Structures are given as C-alpha cells and as structure tokens.
Amino acid sequence: MHLRNITFSLFQLTVLAIQAGCLLLLVMARFGQNPPETLPLATIVFFGAMLSGPLHSLSRDWSGRRFAAATAVAVAASLLLSLLLQGSADHSPEWLLAPAVALLLTGLLRLPARRTGDMLSAMTVYSACTVLANYTLDSFLPVADFFLVNVGTFFFGVTFTQRDRVHAFGRRNVYRMIAFAALANVFMSLTVGTPIRYVVVAFVAILIAETADTEIYHRLLHRPWLVRVARSNAVSAPLDTLIFTLLAFWGEPFATPQWLTQVIVTDVLVKYGASIVVAFGVISWLKQANWIRPQLQEEPGRADA
C-alpha cells in the first residue's frame, strides 16, 4: 500500500512537471540564434509525448479504476497550476496540451499487451526526444569559462538509453523506431521551421552512431544490461557528437576551432553522463521495483529478430 501511494504521488508530480517544464523549455530555447517568443504547438505536443514514458512506467501495473482516478486528479491539478502560472508573462494556456497528450498516450499504452506497451513507450520517448533535440540544437548554455552546453544534448542523452531499452525487442524494431523518428523530425521541420540542414545532419549522425551502438550492444548480449548500455554508449555518444557538430556548424562565422572544441567536449560529457544517469538511476530503480524488469530481459530467439 505504501509503494502504491508513492507511485500515485510521483504520477501527479510528473504531470505537474510536464506543464511547468514548458516554461523551462521556452527559457532554454531562447539561448538560440532566433529566440522564440512562445513555444510552437508541435513542440508542446512532443514535450508531452516525451513525458508519457515515466507516466507509463509508474502506472503500468495499476487497475483501470486506479488509473482513471489518478488521471482525474492530475487533470484538476494541471488546471490549478495553469491558473497559478498565469502570473508569468510567458505563460500560455496551450501548455495544458502537454499534460493532456502525456495522459492520453499513457492511457493508450495500456491497451496492447504489456510487453508491446513497454516497447511503444520507449519508442515514443525516443522519437519525441529526437524532435526536441533538433528544435533546440542551436541553443547553447554557457557554463563556467569553457563549457558550452547544447540544450539538445540533454534530450539526445535520453535517446541513447531509450534505444537500448528497445534493443530487447530486436534490431528490426530499433531501426523501425529510427525511421519513425526521422519522419517525425521532417514533420517538425516543416511545422516550426527547424533548418532542414540540422535535421538531415542529425539523422546522418544518428544513423551512423546508432548502427555502431546496435552492433556493439548485440555483441554484448551475454553481459549485464547496464554494462551493455555503458559500453555501447561510450562509442555512440562521442561518434554522434563529432559527426553532428562538424557537419552542422562547420563554416558558420561563430564556429571557431575553440568554439567547436568547447561544444564537442561538453556534448560528449553531457550525453554520456545523461545516458548513464538514466540507466543507473531511474531505470535501475524501476527495474528493482519490478516495473520494467520484463522489457530489459531478452527473450530466447528475440534478440536478433
């Protein structure tokens, strides 16, 4: 009973964080070359889709009645938070769409078989993160005197671990997920005007880095899952950063050798660090709680499907 109350509370806090996170995303996006006045509607939708992942992990074992009750409480809390945030000059009622999308997708992920729902959840988070990463790729946060943190790096760091979760369902599903994410990014580029150069370069980098990661991961199937994540990401994270940074920004007036070095070093550290934190922190904890144990274990004959 105590654990159920904790998950219920975490569910509510996550839903509130989704709407509040829209403000944080807007602030970080304003460090870009063309600071937006508001978040595009498509960005809000994908941000909500990204947070459906943790909501699914928290509620996947609930009964239909408990999920309905949690959703009702979350909707009421979101409406209250929207009223409180109206005092902010940047607030938009459209931010309510983010928790609405997250709750809707969480409900839909309960419909298929448990294992399929887990796979689709990871795919959803992966695809949404790639979209948000490309949206914020020209936003850089200065840290100390040397580091330049690309905002998109935070989202890409999450994609590495989500991809590693999908590895449990076979190579074919990994590449299907990458293809769907590519289509989602083309849609986003056409909708909000993300430079197509970023989208194309990002997926050239993803295709090369993901292929390397997938092959390394599947050669380590005899090792523990967290070892596979750490070792495959040790190759894919720097590979992705080098390819993208050099192809996307080479030739730009601001892309001096020192600037490129700062971005590459910071991106590698943040991407790898974010993926490890997710893997050893959130996912490891959820695995111990027996919420995502089945999806992190390969079934006989499924690993190379």
Image: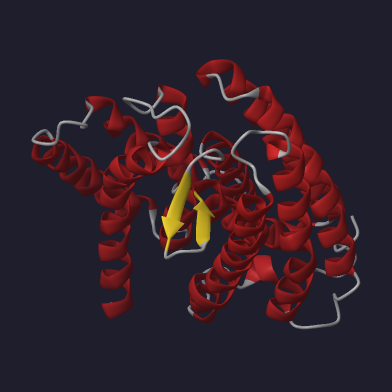
The colour style of the image is secondary structure
Q: Residue at x 33, y 30 (%)?
A: 97
Q: Quadrant of residue 94?
A: top left
Q: Quadrant of residue 200?
A: top right
Q: Is residue 289 above or below residue 176?
A: below
Q: Which sits in the foreground, 159 or 27?
A: 27
Q: Which sits in the foreground, 185 or 267?
A: 267
- Residue 19: % across, % down: 29, 42
- Residue 192: % across, % down: 51, 20
Q: Residue at x 44, y 43 (%)?
A: 107
- Residue 106: % across, % down: 45, 45
The reply, left or right, for residue 130 in relation to residue 140 is right
Residue 298 seen from this side: no
The reply, left or right, for residue 122 in relation to residue 228 is left
- Residue 115: % across, % down: 65, 57
Question: What is the number of callouts on the image?
Answer: 0
Task: Point out the image quarter for the N terminus.
Answer: bottom left
Q: Which sits in the foreground, 282 or 113?
A: 282
Q: Quadrant of residue 44?
A: top left
The reply, left or right, for residue 33 in relation to residue 86 is right
Q: Residue at x 80, y 53 (%)?
A: 210
Task: Point out the image quarter for the C terminus.
Answer: bottom right
Q: Is residue 289 above or below residue 271?
A: below
Q: Residue at x 75, y 71 (%)?
A: 234
